[in-house]
Image: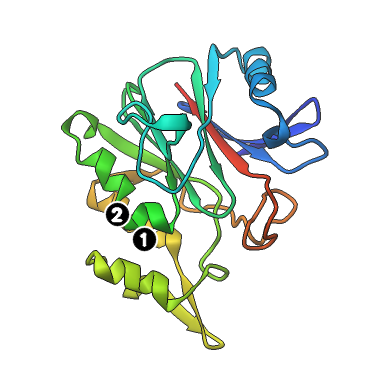
Amino acid sequence: MNIIEIDKYRFLEVSNNPNIIISLKGEKNFCELGESDKLNFMKSNFKLNSYSEFNQVHSILINGQDTSENNKFDGFITKEKNHAFAIKTADCIPLIMWDETKEFLCGLHCGWKGLHQDIIGKILEENKYQSLTKAYIGPHICKDHFEVKQDLIDRFIQVDIDIEGYLSTKENKIFMNLRQLCVDELHEYGIEIHTKFSPCSYTENDLFFSWRRDPGNPFRNLTIAWL
């Protein structure tokens, strides 16, 4: 993976087949641009036809599969070429999935609420999307910094999801391994993980925004993908 810089905007280049880039913190932040400026930037620098991002609300509504008012989606599924979609995160997992022939591309906002509501299974249990076999797990808060309370644990218990193996205790605090929960569910569906490591949004302050580290910061990391 390489860091590329365009007009003082920095991106982490993850893959070019499919195309996956992640906006990084820097002198200028891509996430601060308005919608039309982002579109023009992507058209000019990546030769794209269009660019979309969503009003993410920790739901399991997926653009291309569901309908929603006010552009409220927490994922996308597409066959459209040269149309980039962004998943916005500030500690949650940005998950990108695709198939061997690059017919479909899927992106999901996988925070604990999305995983609790089975946003991954919602896509992978659809017959027409069972060709999805590969995934990239983007930057998110790592297990050493994702502190959770009993009320979160109880929410998973209520829907019969056993997260005991993803919890650890340190100094009387409980921490959760969000990545491993996501990985194990993907493996249940036979999905191959593109990389074995994901940067930690909390600790890598020079690269990523983190809501847990900087509460109230409105900026987001954008994981942008297209066919």
Q: Are marks 2 and 1 in contact (CB under 8 Å)?
A: yes
Q: Position of residue 127 (x, y in %)?
A: 16, 33
Residue depicted at 40% across the width and 16% down the height: 80
User: Which of the two residues, 17 or 113, is positioned nearer the viewer here?
Assistant: 113
Q: Which residue is mark 2?
A: 185
Q: Secondary structure at mark 2?
A: helix
Measured as percent of width and height from the top left, residue 51 is found at 55, 21
Horizontal arrangement in the rendering, residue 46 relative to residue 168 (left or right): right
- The answer to whether residue 162 of the structure is visible from this angle is no
Q: Quadrant of residue 156?
A: bottom left
Question: Does dot 1 land on a helix, a strand or a loop?
Answer: helix
x, y percentage for residue 53? Answer: 53, 30
* Residue position for label 1: 181
* Res. 145 image quadrant: bottom right
* Rendered-image quadrant of the C terminus: top left
Camera-side residue of 67 and 92: 67
Question: Vertically, is 67 above or below 57?
Answer: above
| Three-letter code for the amino acid on which mark 2 is drawn | Glu
Q: Determine whether 197 is above or below 70 in the image.
A: below
Count of all numbered marks drawn on residues in the image: 2
In this picture, residue 39 sits left or right of residue 186: right
Residue 169 marker = none
